[in-house]
Each structure stands twice: as C-alpha cells, then as structure tokens.
Amino acid sequence: MNHKLIYALLLVVLVIWISGCIEEMEEIEGQDKEIAGEVGEEDWTEIKKDEWREAEQTDYDRYIECTKKSLAVERDTCIYDLALELMEETACNRVESGLMGKNLTDTIEYCKRQVKLKKAIELNSLEECRKLDFGFDSDNCVKEIALRRNDSGVCNEISDSAINVNCLNGIAIKQKNIEICNEITLENARGGCYTNVAVSSFDESICDIYENITVKDNCILSVAQAKKDSSVCEKIFSELTKNHCLKTTQ
C-alpha cells in the first residue's frame, strides 16, 4: 500500500513538472514569435532600430550597410555622414572610433554639434542658431541663414569679424553688388570683396574702383582669367602682368 502511495505521489510530481516545462516552452515560443515580427511591423521596426527609432526603416538599412564596411575609419565616416544627412543626433553615438584627428569622445560631440547646426540652418531659424553655444557654431549658423535669405542685414548679427566678412562677401557675390562690400569695415577684406564681385560678374569695369594700380591690374587679371578673354588683358597697365594675363587666357 505504501508503495502504491509513493508511486502515485511520484506520478503527480512528474505531471506537474511536465506541465511547467510545457508552459515555459510556450512562453519562450511566444517571445520568439514576438521578436520575429508577429507583434506587428511597427513594433518590430522599433525593436530593430534601437536608437534609430525616429528614422525610417530604409535609413536603418543604410546604417547597417555602413556597419558592413571592413575598415573602421570607412565604417565610422559612413555612420557620421549618415547622422548628419538624417540630422539624427543619437546616431552619432554609433561612431566607435575617432575621426578628423579627434578622439572618440570629441568626435561624437562634434558630430552632435554639427547635427544641431544643420537642423538650425534647415529650420532657417536665427533663434535656433543663438542656442548653439560652442565656439563659432552660432555665428556660422547665422552666416548660412543670411546666405540662404540673401540678406546682408542678417550678417550684422555675427560677432566674429572674419565670419562677418565672409558672410557679406558671399552675399555681395550672390547679388553682384559692390555696395554690400562697402559694409565691410576691414580695408583689405573690402578690397578683396570688390575683386570677387568683379570676377563673379565677369565685369572688369568694377576694378576701376581701385586707386592702387597693382591691385587694379590684379583685379583685371582675375576677371580676364575667369572670362578666358585675352582682350581684357589689354586693360592692364603693367606689361609684366599683362603678358602673364595673355599667356593664361589663350
């Protein structure tokens, strides 16, 4: 009788153990199905993307292609460029080695800064530019927006003199307007702006603004070379510069 009782108890334990194993297997199978995508394409996309949740699936696939590159510098450059293109700041964290002579930490931070800069420019927002607080990022952002708007007045919001000159110079060239050059306070930079406008306009008469003969000759030389027109060389005073002009425009 005791033996039968023992066997019965063992049988009950065995049944319970088997039932537990079946439940566990069903749970694992359910998890596998969920991961395999049966919870819906959107959820599966979220699982696969990890930090790329805001990107499209095709963008995630492009990231995967980057990771397949054998050389670390090519792989990380690909990821860096993709992060900037998509303006996806968190993607910068995927870079695993230093680039552009920077260590890894600085590379990631620089990547994030460039993403923020590009976002502000794409938004055409001076307010967003002002939020950039590293180095010359804010001034460079304002410059790009000024160029996009073709508005020299925006350049006046730039504090760095070199970036301000670059901004005014760029708009003067776009508008082919030497009056904008006059807004540049630095004399040498202002003169360079005149020449740039003359070259971009293919108009050597602008060079007449210079009183210095040598500077005027060099301005005419630059226009002649841009136009590939040797007849313009005849307007040069210096014979040496004129001969050089004739040789380089034929």
Image: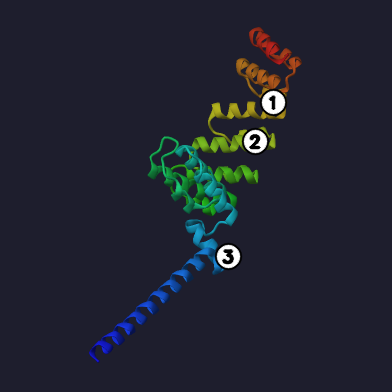
As measured in the structure, the alpha-carbon distance from the residue carrying label 3 to the one carrying label 1 is 63 Å
From the image, state whether disc 3 or disc 1 is nearer to you.
Answer: 3
Residue at position x 53%, y 49% from top? 63
Residue at position x 64%, y 28% from top? 196
User: x and y percent of residue 229 in the render?
Assistant: 75, 18
User: Which residue extends farthest left?
Assistant: 2
Residue at the disc numbered 2 = 172
Question: Which kind of residue does numbered mark 1 sit on?
Answer: Ile
Establish if 46 lies above or below 141.
below
Question: Which kind of residue does numbered mark 3 sit on?
Answer: Glu
Residue at the disc numbered 3 = 41
As measured in the structure, the alpha-carbon distance from the residue carrying label 2 to the one carrying label 3 is 52 Å
Q: Is residue 157 visible?
A: no
Of residue 239 and residue 54, the one placed in the foreground of this image is 54
What is the quadrant of residue 205 in the picture?
top right
Residue at the disc numbered 1 = 206
What is the quadrant of residue 230 in the picture?
top right
Whether the residues at callouts 2 and 1 have beta carbons within 8 Å, the answer is no
User: x and y percent of residue 181 in the render?
Assistant: 62, 33
The C terminus sits in image quarter:
top right
User: Which residue extends farthest bottom?
Assistant: 1
Establish if 221 lies above or below 118.
above
Whether the residues at callouts 3 and 1 have beta carbons within 8 Å, the answer is no
Q: How many other residues sit within 10 Å of disc 1, few (<14), some (14-19) or many (≥20)?
A: many
Residue at position x 69%, y 37% from top? 175
Q: How many other residues sit within 10 Å of disc 2, few (<14), some (14-19) or many (≥20)?
A: many
User: x and y percent of residue 191 in the render?
Assistant: 59, 26
Question: Which kind of residue does numbered mark 2 sit on?
Answer: Ala
The N terminus sits in image quarter:
bottom left
